Amino acid sequence: MSAKTAGIHHITALAGDPQATVDFYAGVLGLRLVKVTVNFDAPDIYHFYFGDETGKPGTAMTFFPYQGAPRGRVGGGQVGVTTFVVPAGTLDFWEARLKKFGIPVERTERFGETFLRLADHDGLHLELVAREEGPESTWSFGGVPTDKAIKGFGGAVLYSLAPEQTLHVLENLLGLERVGASEDGQYVRLRGQADLGQIIDIRREPVPAGSGGAGTVHHIAWRAGSLPEQEGWRQRVSSAGFDVTPIVDRKYFTSIYFRERGGILFEIATDGPGFTVDEPVEALGQKLMLPAWLEPYREHIAANLQPFEVRVLDSTSPARRAGRGACPQAR
Ligand code: ZN
């Protein structure tokens, strides 16, 4: 039986300084820090999840930040550019806001759309695109009103070491629909059925291999509707000849992982149970949350993590010091 993923579930990147990561994604981009936990496979490192008010699938940008992490190089075998979508007509607002924070932006075109290209504090490649599609965010922070706020992912640009093989997986295994090639022939566009995180552009020419580190994407996760669906995905991924992990409990979803032949690490994650499974909506992201199996080590884990706060940035100060309205980050 064939199946189709709705689109992107989350994208996970590597980062340096935790405070700088929070300042950029909450303070500048206005996303909500919806979960503070640790890398379940390496609990001495934070795992931050940013997203809309609840971090629903298609909005969750996640990081493993740690001070002094060596920089990586963006290249083949990675998500090359992470695309966020903002409401139609708001690109000028975003361009002005980013410039106010001293962040260089460049306008580019693809498939008849305008993109604002930028890099985060670690050099991670990002872009903003304005579209009608996708529900407006209900989260407002740091001077970004809800009618201008990032709605979630617009999609991603994939840099593959073997674009034909990656395309084959996206189309024939994940069930994305091929839309066509860009006017200049540089990209092929595919589309999933969700209204966020559904538009995937892939560079047609192989991109020289990147290397992992701060400022690069670690993996991209695709959506599975439910656990039985995920079991079906696991069967199909395995039958297609990929080395796929068992189903792993990530507390907020369950996951399987496999590396496609273009070198990009793919995950398939369930939509549920989501980030409200251990905290109410209004308290999301305010405390360090641990899965039951790490709870006995809380004191030790917390002592090794660098404190940080979610704060409103003052763009008039070159130091971007915290402005009024800063809220302390509980540990
Ligand atoms: Zn993941």
Image (tube, helix red, strand yellow):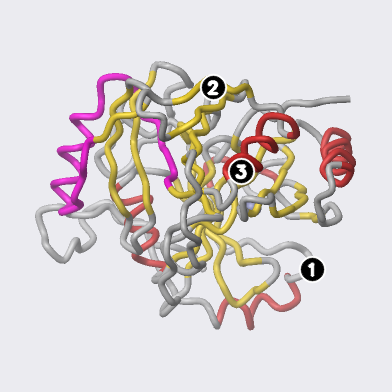
Name the residue tied to disc 2: 195
The magenta stretch spans residue 301: no
**Can you say whether 63 is above or below 85 in the image?**
below
Label 1 crowding class (10 Å Cα cut-off): few <14, some 14-19, many 20+? Answer: few
Judge: label 3 CB < 8 Å from ligand 1: no
282 sits left or right of 111 in the view: right
The disc labelled 3 sits on which kind of residue?
Pro
Q: Nearer the viewer, mark 1 or mark 3?
A: 1
Marks 3 and 2, how far apart at CA: 25 Å
288 sits left or right of 267 in the view: left
Identity of the residue drawn at 49% across and 63% down:
14
181 sits left or right of 41 in the view: left
Marks 1 and 3, how far apart at CA: 21 Å
> What is the number of the mark on residue 280?
3
Name the residue tied to disc 1: 293
Contact between labelled residues 1 and 2, with CB atoms less than 8 Å apart: no
Q: Position of residue 35 (x, y in %)?
A: 56, 53
The magenta stretch spans residue 84: yes
Contact between labelled residues 3 and 1, with CB atoms less than 8 Å apart: no
Label 3 crowding class (10 Å Cα cut-off): few <14, some 14-19, many 20+? Answer: few
Q: Earlier in the sequence, mark 2 or mark 1?
A: 2
Q: Earlier in the sequence, mark 1 or mark 3?
A: 3
Q: Which residues are magenta?
A: 81-107
The disc labelled 1 sits on which kind of residue?
Trp
Identity of the residue drawn at 89% across and 42% down:
239
Q: Nearer the viewer, residue 177 or 326?
A: 177
